[in-house]
DNA sequence: CGTTGAATTGAAAGTGATCAAGGCGTGTGG
DNA sequence: CCACACGCCTTGATCACTTTCAATTCAACG
């Protein structure tokens, strides 16, 4: 039984057999979640670690005014450390996009895992990786126009999906609705629609019926403004 | 000789005497940097860890078009893991704001530190902390108006400065120019200026001559839209 | 006392949001 | 099997917030 989480951590640091075994054990108990379900509910024990073994999800926050911001798109192998600080409240959550397989690691188990040097290192590097991605998001939101930002995000998602072996030859399945895309990009669904049309007109990408086709990678990176550096090394 | 870095890590996890010693040793070699200097230069060995022992700095990225986005404001005790992925190139750097004291930890030393469970845990938690902050920035940039965003950032900086023991009673020194503020907020310096005036008119904050005065914390958090949750736990 | 970087002000131009309908596809129940 | 309903995508017109460009003022400093 494949475990994308373990695969990913192994790419980040050399792990002993024992460490690999411990990680498998920790994620052995997986539960199936349907699409469009909130993974984090009120009253959930915090300090846990959430591991996406299969399926897509996103981390989001709802602001007082009711608007929503997506802070991360989670794909198989990705992790969410629900460490104290947040999501005790309902204003911050994680929602599945597709049907998913999720494992939950208890805080005590996480602590135990961290005592093993290889695992500690791998978890640390994985976190650094996520941080690089977040920084790229900040840059996008702060200094890119909507078209650049959209191109940038699509490129990121495409590359990440490719790394998982999903899709080939410029085509991957991208189960995000324009609404979710909008909340990730910090814009309106209406405007996302127009921007996608513009990208299509530029012959850069097509996104239709949940299928993303990168017609012209060069044009897309050009529009995005060359920032996929942070992804190049992601994975090794 | 105080070491804010060690102080901070101790707040994140219980450390043995030996671990504390190792951290002190690793940051023993500090160098003084003048204000407005780039800390990361081309050709710098990557994979190092940069530790701010004293002074302020910011992490930024310059886009092709020449615009700049600040991704983090670094204060004493804060860390920058220059892990591979980025800043090999000149497009991403760290610049001091004030005169500063900085220690550099070599990759090999970092690896060694990580083998000690308490340190591994503390570094991990510190990283989670930074991540929470980055996520909050993403939310701000994506779904807050410029006034809310500015209020939010000023509040964050104020609370972080307070925790360091700098300033009291609603007044702290904030050495950021409006230009840097603008690049952190993803807006124009001109607009930052107008927004600050608006905040002053609302009797929420005053920022003049590098001194930030929170006239009315309630009003400020109100405008910011209540998102300082992620800071409350920061520090313990 | 001039020079320099930062802060401030005003007017014009854009970019993206908002509001309001309409279209399309799919699944479900009559 | 058709029809309706619901979610999602699409389009148009208008409005608002921010940027841009261009000067001007201010404060610190040599």
Image (tube, coloured by chain):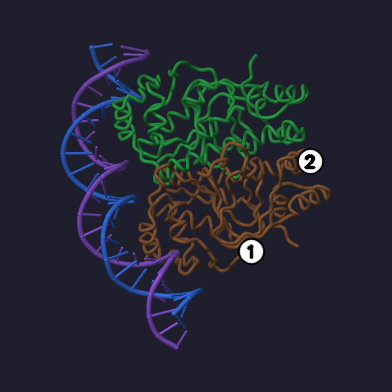
Chain colours: A brown, B green, C blue, D purple
Please give the chain letter of the residue carrying mark 2. A
Q: Pinpoint residue B138: horizontal percent, then vertical percent.
A: 47, 43
Relative side of A180 to B79, left or right: left
User: Which residue, given by chain and number where applicable, does mark 2 sit on?
Assistant: A116
Instruction: Say which element carries label 1.
Output: loop
Please give the chain letter of the residue carrying mark 1. A
Q: Is residue B68 above or below residue B56?
A: below
Which of the marked residues, 2 or 1, is nearer the chain's N terminus?
Answer: 2
**Disc 2 and disc 1 in contact, CB within 8 angstroms:** no
User: How would you rate the neighbour count of disc 1 (Cα within 10 Å): few for under 14, some for 14-19, many for 20 or more?
Assistant: few
Quadrant that contains the N terminus of chain A: bottom right
Q: Is residue A148 above or below residue C29?
A: above
User: Which residue, given by chain and number where applicable, does mark 1 sit on?
Assistant: A165
Instruction: Say which element carries label 2.
Output: loop
Distance of label 2 from label 1 (alpha carbons):
29 Å
Q: Pinpoint residue B229: horizontal percent, then vertical percent.
A: 52, 34
Foreground residue among B31 and B191: B191
- The total number of labels drawn is 2
Relative side of B216 to A128, left or right: left
Q: Pinpoint residue B218: horizontal percent, then vertical percent.
A: 40, 27
Q: Is residue B74 above or below residue A45?
A: above
Q: Residue furthest right?
A: A18
Instruction: Name the mark on residue B112.
Output: none
Question: Residue at position x 37%, y 33% from top?
Answer: B223
């Amino acid at each position: 039984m494949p475990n994308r989480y373990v695969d990913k951590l192994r790419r980040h640091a050399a792990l002993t057999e024992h460490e690999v075994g411990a990680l498998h054990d920790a994620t052995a108990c997986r539960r199936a979640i349907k699409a469009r379900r909130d993974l984090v509910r009120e009253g959930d024990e915090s300090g846990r670690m959430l591991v996406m073994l299969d399926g897509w999800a996103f981390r989001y926050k709802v602001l007082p005014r009711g608007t929503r911001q997506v802070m991360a798109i989670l794909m198989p192998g990705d992790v969410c450390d629900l460490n104290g600080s947040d999501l005790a409240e309902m204003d911050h959550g994680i929602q599945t996009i597709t049907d998913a397989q999720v494992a939950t690691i208890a805080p005590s188990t996480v602590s135990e895992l961290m005592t093993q040097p290889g695992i500690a290192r791998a978890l640390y590097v994985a976190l650094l990786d996520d941080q690089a991605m977040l920084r790229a998001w900040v840059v996008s939101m702060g200094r890119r126009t909507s078209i650049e930002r959209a191109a940038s995000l699509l490129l990121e998602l495409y590359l990440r999906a490719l790394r998982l072996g999903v899709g080939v030859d410029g085509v991957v399945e991208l189960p995000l609705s324009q609404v979710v895309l909008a909340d990730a990009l910090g814009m309106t669904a209406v405007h996302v629609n127009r921007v996608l049309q513009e990208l299509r007109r530029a012959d850069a990408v097509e996104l239709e019926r949940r299928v993303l086709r990168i017609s012209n990678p060069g044009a897309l990176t050009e529009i995005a403004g060359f920032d996929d550096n942070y992804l190049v090394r992601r994975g090794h």
